[in-house]
Amino acid sequence: MKKSFFAVSSVSLALMLGVGAAIAQDAEPIRIGVAVAQTSNVALLGQEQVIGAEIAAQYFNDLGGINGRPIELVIQDTAGDEAGAINAFNTVIAEGVVGIVGPTLSQQAFAADPIAEAARVPVIAPSNTARGIPEIGAYIARVSAPVALVAPNAVRTALEFDPEIQRVAVFFAQNDAFATSETGTFQETVTALGLELLPVQTFQTTDTDFTTQITNILPLNPDLAIVSGLAADGGNLVRQLRELGYEGLIVGGNGLNTANIFPVCQAFCDGILIAQAYSYSYENEVNSAFRDIYFEQQGKEPPQFSGQAFAGVQVFVEALIELDNTVGLDTLDLAATRDQLNTTLLGLTYDTPLGVISFTPEGEINQGTFYVAQISMNEDGQTGSFVFVNTIDVTAEATPEATPAS
Amino acid sequence: MDQFITTYGFLIIMMMLQAVLALSLYLPLMAGQLSLATPGFFAIGGYVAAVLSTQKFLPAPGTTFPEPLQSFVTWLATVFPLTPTGQGFPIGLVLVEMVIGGLLCGLVAILIGLPALRLRGIYLALATIAFVEVLRVVSLNLPITGGAIGIFGIPQPFPTDATKFSYIVIALPFLLLCMAYVYRLERSRVGRAFIALREDELAATAMGINPTYHKVLAFAMGAVMAGMAGAMTAHVLNTWNARQGTFDASILILAYVIIGGSRTFLGPVVGALLLTALPEVLRQVAGIDGLPDFLAAFLRDGRLVIYGFLIAFGVLSFPQGLLTPELLKRKKKASAPLPPTGGG
Amino acid sequence: MELTTLLQQLINGLSIGSVYAIFALGYTLIFSILGIINFAHGAVFTMGAYFTYALIGSRFGFNGIFANAQLPFGLPFPLALIAGGVLAGLVGVLIERTTFRPLRRRGADPLLTLVSSLGMAVALVNLIQYFVGAEAYSYPSSVLAGLPPSINFGTPEKPLIVRTVQIVIAIISLIILVGLTLFINKTKTGRALRAVSEDGTTASLLGINTDRLIVLTFFISGFVGGIAGTLVGLSVTITGPYFGIAFGLKGLAVIVLGGMGNIPGAVLGGLVIGIAENLLPASAVAYKDAIAFAILFIVLLVRPQGILGRAQITKV
């Protein structure tokens, strides 16, 4: 958004020209809402999502949009609270969007998704991984795999790296819904694997000093530390763990799954294992294109939040094309479009940057492949990258065990 | 009109509920007490509604009230009309939750108020901030409040109304009742005792006004209002969690009162309505076609910068608040001479 | 609790306590003169950290108006630290000029100033985000070059570990504290400041230029806040525009505990709260954040003037 003032990169310029060539000038655009947090202290995640969604809009318009009709994103800021999310949802619904990608936080989803449900507008959640999101209603689906499927992979990978692991220290941000939900899964995984769970230590996302919690745990000699929080607090916790002498493996939760953690724990980030629902190194046509455009614009590899937002827009675009081919969008009014779009999108299979995905009738994502990445920091201690160390194919396994409420 | 309600229906409900919160802070201020505890009571009220409506009022076995309370609740649900569709959560039960939430908050307010209201000015403000923060951490750790995730899936009296505007049938009478209550109070013996305490506690005490009794009374009245507003907001927001009662909310509510005017009950109401609407108005202004790009971008991404400056400089431009008793009197008797205005 | 663990937690408490203290100094300075809490202090603290970041010649990130901007020069860290403090001091002066002075001139209710300073805090925090985005920024690790990340004061079997950057913060806090105390007690300006804080009206009748002294206080408060921001940023990185705000609430508890407007009190209050938070049993760590406020509440009820404060003043 803001970047467009400063540098219109050659790629986006080319894409804009491409749009003009591929799409009839007079075709009225189809509007898709993007309601994520662009301000407040979760703005960083929301900004990554906006970038992913905008790249998707450019990319699919370049390919011809919805059979010649372009799509237009209606982007609204939800800020970080519930009322903001509801306001943003109401605003995009009033602007006549056919569907909404958002919001950023699960807590906001519990407030805003019922709004879309009652208005019968389909919602694709790009990053809500807490339990109970698709269950909010028939119009709510998500492309963000639930934490119960993603998180355990990192613990299993840590055990592969170091089979001697016995005692596990678990830290989580008690004022963050996502971290609270995630730590439940981590703790169940640790117990299920027969490891010893040391007394769980909590903190707040606004904390910067974690020496109390670390001093509580270090005398118990943990072999593995699992951290669920956000980038700033999680990064500081990792840094202070290392500075106070912890030498074992560290598993980070999804909140740490961003390059924004690098400046926080710097050289100490090295070696953190994080389970991933998206890998930039995944090879298919759409991901290569996405990765190239993202790299061109941002100068780094795309993170998971951008990848999932891209997938969210893609689901709407492909379902709209299908709907246009089968029924014809011009025969439907807005309400009928929203209604049938919801039915259509739940029935299709999509080849996205996340891999091949589909939905359960409830709106839960079926995703076949997950990854585990390890952070590798460069010499300067300021920059680094996620190196993919493990790929887990869950389609081979039986359906995942249901997890009780956290 | 439909379009307007789709976009602003929810906002209008929120504006009304925030106005009640502003009145809840105004009440102790009438008695000269700067209390920032309103969000704490608001949070308690919300939890009461969330717990009752998701766990106690549903017809699941084993989750009912002991008799005869349950019979009473069932009776209420039949006496009060159901929603137009006939399948929503009974409005009557929302009202019951508001009453329970309000009463509980009143009780807590008396317990906290008795020791704390000996403090004055900024010291009382700080003590109430401490109350709100301790409450927040406790609610993160109690099983019944659901930790950081909170309680979600709160049943809706108007399940088919996406805009939430139907809540107007509760919110508007509720706000009007609160306003009428404070209006009457300002003209009653008790209200005049509050004001006497604010103007000069020593003189008021000498005239036989019991300071502790009146201060705790004002504090508890405010708490009841905040608790009731919380109970209703939990339904409007669909979900409730520990982030609803925070220091940020304390400050915002204080800003309603100060910007609106702290000497008449209309001030807080107007302040709350304006400040709650402001970020959304800026959002719409940013969307107007034909604005220069840089301006639209600033209005969109810099909304809160403008908001902050408006609060800071609003106070400078209207040190008495937007509405003052003098201004209201002037409206009434346009020819009457202006009373002198001085510092508060 | 084992003895080593107890000692380690005491050390942890002292180091986080010194952070609370250095933050609260800025609050308490202004309170001592005006009897008002400057809620924008957290934003000034944050800005100090960003100023230093820019002055050492680091580049800003992708988000915000200053995307990829960078100064054409880079100062060495100690110089940038002080320059960042000076710039933060100037922001403090600007806040005084725009939000405090006009209200004071009118003799307005101190409550208005409180709200006005809060509005300023909201505006500044969001202005930071508008300019440089919400990402975390860190100073290059070469700043503390040559120093190990932590020092073990115990034995390898019974370690007592202190993060080096915390020692740096504690030392600089001490220097600032001593400097401020000397300034206030030994210099003519300092004595004038004390006169104003005792009784502003009498002081101005005695020919003391109150306005000039208030500006000076805001500058010193901003300067100390800016330096504190940089140091804490060095310890935990600048975690975003809300960086300083997170300390704002705890800072309130600290100054009440120590005695509002009392400089040694702010330091003592910071250390006491830091230690109290760390002596919590491991199983109760979930309530750590409530400790400061529980203490605040109890102190207000039992001894509202704080540990080192004098009898309660009825300033609002």
Image: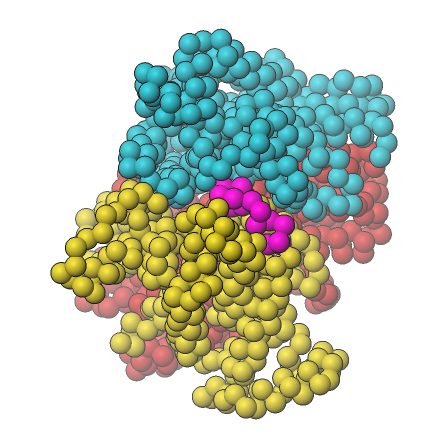
Q: Nearer the viewer, residue B102 or A344?
A: B102
Q: Is residue B21 visible?
A: no
Q: Residue at x 24, y 68 (%)?
A: A28
Direction from residue A72 to residue C182 in the image, left or right: right
Q: Nearer the viewer, residue A301 or A212?
A: A212
Which x, y percent locates residue C62?
39, 37
Give the quarter of the figure containing the C terminus of chain A.
Answer: bottom right
Q: Residue at x 54, y 65 (%)?
A: B224
Which chain does yellow denote in the image?
B
Direction from residue B235 to residue B134 in the image, left or right: right
Q: Residue at x 75, y 35 (%)?
A: C279
The tint chain C carries is cyan
Q: Which residues are magenta?
A: B112-126
Asked if the stretch drawn in magenta spans residue B123, the answer is: yes
Which chain does red denote in the image?
A
Q: Quadrant of residue A323?
A: bottom left
